[in-house]
Amino acid sequence: MLELGKAGTAGAGKGVIPVFRSGSVVATLRASDWKESATAVVGDREWVFSKRKGELTGRWAAEPEAAARLRAKQTSLWKGTWSADLDGTPVEVESASYWKGTHRFTSGGRAVAESGTTGGWSPRPTLTVHTDLPLDQQVFLLWLLLVISRRNTAAITAATGAAVIGGSS
C-alpha cells in the first residue's frame, strides 16, 4: 500500500510530501497548493504532473511540455468517474464510497487498485494495488486521488458558503 505522508516529514523538505510503502519512503511529491500540478521524484526520475486542456498529465521532467506518458480525464462530474491512460494501459476510476472518499481502479473489467484514507482529522489518500503496476504510475494515481480530494473539498466549501449566504438574508 502506498500512503501520502505529512509534508516536511521523514526527511522530506518543507512542502515536500513523502510517499510511503511499508513505512519506507519510496517517492516524494511537491504538490502546488493553488494549481493542479506537482513534481514527483520516483527513484532517480523526476516527473512533472500538471493540468493541460482539462486533462491531468504526467511526463518526465526532461521531456517537452507537450509530452504525456500518463493521462487522466474526468468523464462524469456527477458520478465522479475518470478515465486514465497509464503509458498505454487504460484504467477506469470510479467512486467506491462518496462519504469515505474512496475509489476503485479497473482495467479491462479487472480490479487494478483501490484507494483509502489515513490520517484522522486531515485524511490523506492511500492506494492499494492488486497488479504489477509500476511505481511511477502508482504515484500518478496517488496524485490523482489528491486532486480529486481537493476538488471535492472545494465543492463542499463552496456549497456550504452559498447555503450560509443564502440562509442569512
Image: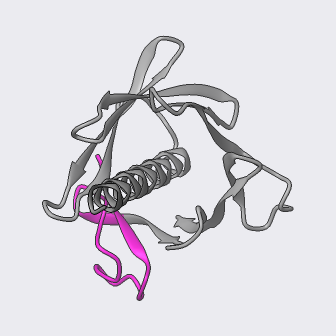
17 left or right, relative to 5: right
1 left or right, relative to 46: left
In the rendered view, would you say 131 is above or below 27?
above
Q: Residue at x 66, y 42 (%)?
A: 71
Main secondary-structure element of the magenta-colored stretch: loop
Find the residue positioned furthest to the left.
120
Assign the C terminus to one quadrant of the image: bottom left
Q: How many marks?
A: 0
In the rendered view, would you say 33 is above or below 164?
below
**Image quadrant of residue 47?**
bottom right
Magenta residue span: 1-25
Is residue 20 part of the magenta span, yes or no?
yes
133 left or right, relative to 23: right
x and y, in percent, of residue 29 in the image = 48, 68
Judging depth in this view, the residue of 14 and 42 nearest the camera is: 14
Find the residue positioned furthest to the top.
109
Q: Residue at x 13, y 60 (%)?
A: 120
14 left or right, relative to 122: right
> What colour scheme does the image use?
one colour
Is residue 56 part of the magenta span, yes or no?
no
Judging depth in this view, the residue of 75 and 124 nearest the camera is: 75
In the rendered view, would you say 51 is above or below 35?
above
x and y, in percent, of residue 132 in the image = 46, 32
x and y, in percent, of residue 8 in the image = 34, 83
Q: Residue at x 28, y 46 (%)?
A: 1
